[in-house]
Amino acid sequence: MASALPTAMERPHFIGIGGAGMSGIAQILARRGAQVAGSDAKESPTADALRELGATVHIGHAAGHLADDASCVVVSSAIRADNPELLRAAELSVPVVHRSDALASLMLGRRAIAVAGTHGKTTTTSMLAVALGELDLDPSYAIGGDLAGPGTNARHGDGEIFVAEADESDRSFHKYDPEVAIVLNVELDHHANYASMDEIHESFETFVGKVAPGGTLVVSADQEGAVELTSRLGGRADLRIATYGESPTADVRVLSIVPHGLTSDVTVSLDGAELTFTVSVPGRHYALNAVAALTAGAALDVPAADLARALGAYTGVKRRLQLKGEAEGVQVIDSYAHHPTEMAADLEAMRGAAADSRLLVVFQPHLFSRTQELGKEMGQALAAADASVVLDIYPAREDPIPGVTSDMIVEAARAAGADVTPVRSADAASVVEVVAGMAKPGDLVLTMGAGDVTDLGPRILARLSS
C-alpha cells in the first residue's frame, strides 16, 4: 500500500531520536523514503539501527546538528525549551512538530487501531502487530517498546492496518483519528499533567471522541476507571462500543484463564462461539490484554478464530517480564512496571509462574511527582516480594521535589511487612554487590522500573557467574 510522504516529513530532524516513541516514527519515515536526521544523548543499538536505514544520527545536542534545509523538527514532551537544536530551529524558522502529530501523519489513509490505557499499551499493541503479521496482513505499527520477536518497535508495512500505541501522559493521543480505539484501563497517573481523576476521564473522553464515524471503541468491562469512562460517553449513534473482560455483561467474555508456568490458556465467548488460545507470557493482565487485541482485530473484520491462533505467536516485549538470563541457579527477569497497579500485576504473575521460588525485587522509582503521589502504594506492592532493594528515584525529565525521596516507599513497604533494603548509591557496582549477596540458587531476581534499572540485570548475572 503506497503512502504519500507529507512535505513537512521529507527531511525531518528528531531531537531525542533514540527514544522509544521517537525512534519508531523515524524508522517508518526512513523506510518511506524520508531523509531522516536527529540527535540523542548517547550511542545505542537504536541509533545504529537508524543509521543502517540511512538516517544521520548525532550524539549530543548542538545547534550545528540541525541542517539548514530540515523540513521540520520533531520533539516529544520531554524536550526542554532551552535545547540548542530547538533554539536553532526558531532562528531558521523551521516548523516544530510534536511526535504525536508526526505519528498521526503516518496513519493517514490507513485503518488505524490506537491502543490507550494507563497500563498495558505496549503489550497490547505488540500482540496485535505480531498476530496481524502472522496472518500475512503486513501491518504498520509504532510501539513504545521493542518486540522480543522482530526486535523492533516500528514497521512500515504494505497492508492497510496501522497499529499505534496512544500515549495519554501529555494528552498527545488527542491527535489521532483511529477507526478502532482500545481503552484498557483508566487510572490516575502522570501527576505533572493531571490533577485529578476527573481530568483523566475528560482526556480519555476527548480521545474516544476522535474515533472516526462508524468506528469502534474496545473497552474493558472489568476495570473501574474504564467502566466509568463508558458510562460517561452517553449515546453516540456512529460509535460502536465493544466491551471485553470477565464481567457477565462483556461483549467478548473471558470464560477462563488457566496458567501453565510462563503461559496461559484463555477461553472466550465471542459472537456465540467459544475460542481457546494460548498467551505465551505469564499473568492474568497479559491474558486480558490479548483479549482486548482479539476484540479490536475482530472489529476490523479479521476472522476471530485465525486471530486467536495467531496471538499465540506473541512472545513478549523487551522489559515486560523479559528473562535476561540465569547464573548459578538464579534467574534474572526485567520488568518495566513503575505504577503500583503494574507492579502488583507483575509480582502476581511471577508468583503464579514460579510459586516455589523466592522472589527478590530491585525497584527503582520513576519520577518525583509519581513517587510523591503513589509512593505509599508502591511500597505496599513490594510486600508481595520475599525481599526488595529500593534505589533512589530516577528523575527522567523532572527536577527534584523537596522532601520527596524513595524513603517514602521504603517506609510504606516496611509498614506493610516487607523486607526492604534501601541502597542510596549512584554506583551500580554497589547495587550489584548487594543483590548478588542476597540471591541464592532457585531465586528469581526481578529488576523493576522505567529507568536505567534495566541495565543492572546483565551485571547481576555477570557478578553471580564470577
Image (cartoon, rainbow, N blue to C red):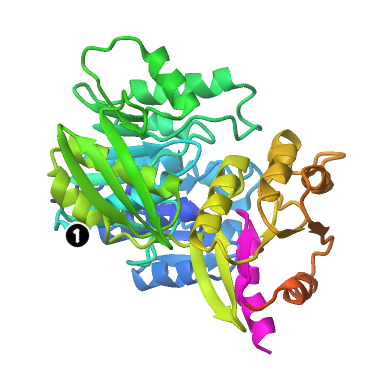
Q: Is residue 259 left or right of residue 363?
A: left
Residue 407 falls inside the magenta stretch: no
Q: Is residue 60 left or right of residue 173?
A: right
At 73% across and 60% down in the image, what residue appears? 387
Whole-percent x, y for residue 150 in the image: 32, 66
At 73% across and 45% down in the image, what residue appears? 379
- The quarter holding residue 8 reads top left
Q: Relative to 292, does residue 323 appear above or below in the rendering?
A: below
Q: Where the C terminus falls, by quadrant?
A: bottom right
**Residue located farthest toward the bottom when viewing the structure as drawn:** 466
Whole-percent x, y for residue 67 in the image: 47, 58
Q: Relative to 181, does residue 238 appear above or below in the rendering?
A: above
Whole-percent x, y for residue 332 in the image: 58, 71
Residue 106 in view (yes/no): no
Circle 1 packing at 10 Å, graded few (<14), some (14-19), many (20+), is some
Q: Nearer the viewer, residue 206 or 117?
A: 117
**Residue located farthest toward the front when viewing the structure as drawn:** 356
Task: Magenta stretch: give its range.
Answer: 442-466
Q: Nearer the viewer, residue 370 or 51?
A: 370
Q: Relative to 239, does residue 263 appear above or below in the rendering?
A: below
- The quarter holding residue 439 reads bottom right
Q: Nearer the viewer, residue 249 or 183?
A: 249
Residue 361 in view (yes/no): yes
Residue 447 falls inside the magenta stretch: yes
Whole-percent x, y for residue 122 in the image: 42, 49
For label 1, the SS is helix
User: Where does label 1 land, which residue?
Assistant: 134
At 37% across and 67% down in the image, what residue appears? 151
Instruction: Give the residue type at disc 1.
Output: Glu
**Residue located farthest toward the top when viewing the structure as drawn:** 235
